[in-house]
């Protein structure tokens, strides 16, 4: 991530992301051609979609002479780590409000954030929720809680989900548009939905986009997606593949699916987003959602650092992150 990179450089970079044929039990049985777009490889830290979300935010922060990134997230957040890394790389400071006041120990993610110089401030879950429920414009104008110094602080909402973040994610869709062949669908995990929205917009109607919701109560979040602003584009959302919700212990069936996927394809995936998206895609294939011979592109959104929070469930070797 670099301030000097112009917009066209992001497209070029997105176009270099490789696609890899993968197999899963039901998609194979149904005769689907499955391609994984390896956006986990967009940067060396496997930070994935957060690279796209931060790209224009960082550019903007630097252009407006900001000195510090201020954001918020949970203890295993990929977004927090991406912000800490981006701030460090661009000579800025960083600060984060962390969800939950009473952590017995610092997660490895937060330890990494701290060692990159990020200031961590813990707030109660209730307070955190009331902050995230505010519109972003109001979040950014709470001086004492979030921005101590308006002149120097640049606020990025939870998950990097603002207009500049969505704009960055459009380049995923644009790169797919320039990839040879027309897929039947592009599938992506949906947290806040900013990535999904960007992908849909960037695809510009090339094909259908399927978002797989990974959070349990996605539909309750009123700020989700801004999907109303996507006009005339073919997309849908799939629910019911959250495997119990964010950060929950995975059911044995899902752990088996995870292990089998990594062993068969030699690609490491994170359990919070990409695993659930793939699980959803494979289940939908079983239910006959696609036709034999369809090509489906699934997006690996990265976030491999989050695997560390699940270490107790992994009894198989992690495939190497590079192809
Ligand atoms: C943040 C994240 C997502 C979700 O992106 P949203 O734009 O919030 O929907 C998906 N995958 C990974 C690995 C992430 O870190």
Image: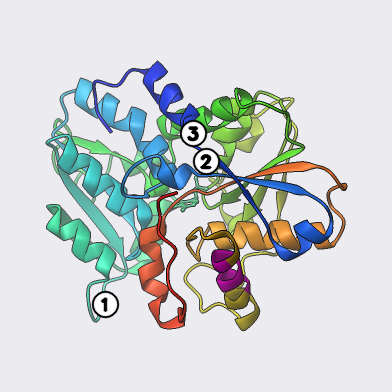
Residue 118 percent across, percent down from the top left: 16, 53
State whether residue 3 is above or below residue 271.
above
Residue 59: where, in percent of width, then height? Answer: 28, 25
Q: Residue at x 31, y 70 (%)?
A: 100
Q: Residues within 10 Å of mark 3 (few under 14, many from 20)?
A: many
Instruction: Say which element carries label 2.
Output: helix
Q: Position of residue 311 (x, y in %)?
A: 39, 77
Q: Is residue 216 visible?
A: no
| Mark nearer the viewer, 1 or 2 | 2
Magenta stretch encompasses residue 295: no
Q: Which mark is residue 102?
A: 1
Q: Residue at x 47, y 77 (%)?
A: 316
Element class at badge 1: loop
Residue 111, above or below 221 = below
Judge from the rendering whether residue 80 lies leftward or rightward of residue 113; answer left or right. right
Give the residues drawn in magenta, as a range. 257-263
The local secondary structure at tag 3 comes to: helix
Whichever of callouts 3 and 1 sits on the residue coming sooner in the sequence is 1
Residue wearing tag 2 = 195
């Amino acid at each position: 991530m670099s301030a000097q990179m112009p917009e066209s450089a992001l497209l070029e970079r997105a176009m270099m992301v490789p696609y890899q044929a993968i197999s899963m039990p039901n998609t194979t049985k149904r005769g689907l051609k499955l391609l994984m777009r390896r956006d986990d490889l967009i940067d060396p830290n496997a930070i994935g979609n957060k690279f796209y979300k931060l790209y224009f935010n960082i550019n903007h922060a630097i252009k407006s002479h900001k000195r510090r990134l201020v954001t918020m997230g949970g203890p295993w957040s990929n977004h927090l780590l991406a912000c800490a890394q981006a701030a460090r790389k661009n000579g800025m400071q960083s600060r984060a409000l962390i969800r939950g006041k009473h952590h017995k120990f610092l997660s490895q993610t937060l330890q990494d954030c701290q060692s990159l110089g990020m200031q961590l401030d813990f707030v109660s879950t209730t307070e955190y929720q009331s902050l995230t429920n505010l519109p972003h414009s109001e979040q950014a104008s709470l001086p004492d809680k979030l921005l101590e110094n308006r002149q120097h602080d640049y606020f990025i909402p939870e998950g990097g989900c603002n207009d500049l973040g969505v704009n960055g994610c459009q380049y995923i869709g644009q790169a797919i548009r320039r990839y040879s062949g027309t897929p039947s669908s592009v599938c992506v995990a949906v947290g806040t939905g900013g990535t999904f929205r960007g992908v849909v917009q960037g695809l510009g109607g090339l094909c259908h986009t399927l978002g797989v919701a990974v959070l349990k109560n996605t539909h309750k979040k009123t700020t989700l997606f801004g999907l109303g602003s996507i006009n005339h584009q073919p997309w849908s959302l799939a629910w019911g593949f959250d495997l119990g919700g964010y950060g929950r212990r995975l059911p044995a069936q899902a752990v088996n699916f995870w292990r089998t996927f990594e062993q068969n394809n030699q690609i490491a995936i994170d359990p919070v987003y990409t695993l659930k998206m793939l699980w959803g895609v494979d289940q939908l294939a079983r239910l006959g959602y696609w036709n034999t011979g369809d090509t489906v592109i699934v997006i690996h959104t990265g976030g491999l650092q989050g695997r560390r929070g699940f270490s107790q469930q992994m009894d198989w070797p992690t495939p190497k992150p590079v192809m």
